[in-house]
Amino acid sequence: MDEIIKYFPNLTDLQKEQFAKLDFLYHDWNEKINVISRKDIDALYTKHILHSLGIAKVMRFEPGTYVLDVGTGGGFPGIPLAILFPETRFYLIDVIAKKIKVVQGVVDGLELKNVKAEQLRAENVKGDFDFIVSRAVTNMPDFVSWIKSKIKKQNKHALQNGILYLKGGDLTEELKDFPKATEYNLADFFEDEFFETKKVVHVPLKFVV
């Protein structure tokens, strides 16, 4: 919890309380439904929460922004981002029902009003979004094919509407068909060695009719 406050010092009391609650909520739910590996649950704040918040070091969502989290798993990056940006709406989806059950349980435990969670494939999502976030659910070409028709036409951020993707390693091959993609190294923002190879990738996408 201390590292969240270290890198995000302007949290409200409510946000601090919600971030602090994540420890109990995820340990409790993980006992019932294993969505986080045993070795990672003890590093929850670094490997899941702070990692998710890496997106916030690249993008500050404006009030009223609509964000889709594809393959959210146990709620990452969507839930930490929803705490940080209470006036942004988040739609968290995953194809696995038990993961969405955990997400809904955590959302209810935090009393988050800006999150909707649903068991659904990305291709079947209705509506359009300013940004689509994810943590390395697949390679970029496949991911883009799932969501390319779900981007809003109107831009209201410095970064163009599109994808904000958490991924690690050398992405040269994977991004070769996306010349406008930008990689942001999380090691520039966070000191922990876990982030040495971790990145946020922004891929701008045009509105498709």
Image (tube, rainbow, N blue to C red):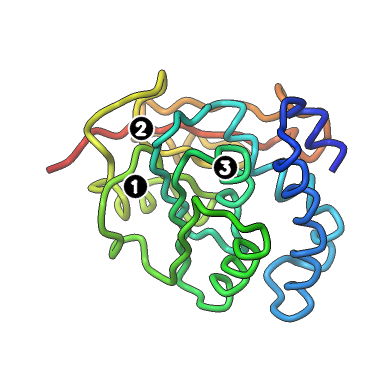
User: Above or below — where is 205 with respect to 69?
Assistant: above
Q: Tell me the distance, in whole angstroms, between the alpha carbons under discs 2 and 3.
A: 16 Å
Where residue 53 appears, x then y in whole percent?
65, 38
Q: Is there CB contact under 8 Å for labels 1 and 2?
A: yes
Amino acid type of the residue tagged 2 in the rendering: Phe
Residue denoted by label 3: 166
Residue drawn at x 44%, y 46% is 89
Amino acid type of the residue tagged 3 in the rendering: Leu
Instruction: Name the image quarter holding the C terminus.
Output: top left
Q: Is mark 2 on a helix, strand or loop?
A: loop
User: Above or below — where is 84 with respect to 109?
Assistant: above
Q: Is there CB contact under 8 Å for labels 2 and 3?
A: no
Q: Residues within 10 Å of mark 1 (few under 14, many from 20)?
A: some
Q: Residues within 10 Å of mark 3 (few under 14, many from 20)?
A: many
Where residue 129 appears, x then y in whole percent?
33, 43
- Label 2 vs 3, first from the N-terminus: 3
Residue drawn at x 75%, y 64% is 26
Where residue 147 appears, x then y in whole percent?
31, 51
Residue denoted by label 1: 144
Amino acid type of the residue tagged 1 in the rendering: Val
For marks 1 and 2, give the one nearer the viewer.
Answer: 1
Q: Tell me the distance, in whole angstroms, between the alpha carbons under discs 1 and 2.
A: 10 Å
Q: Tell me the distance, in whole angstroms, between the alpha carbons under discs 1 and 3.
A: 14 Å
Where residue 152 appears, x then y in whole percent?
26, 38
Q: How crowded is mark 2: few (under 14 residues within 10 Å), some or many (20 or more)?
A: some
- Identify the mark at residue 188; answer none if there is no mark: none
Q: Give the farthest residue toward the left.
A: 209
Residue denoted by label 2: 178
Q: What element carries label 1?
A: helix
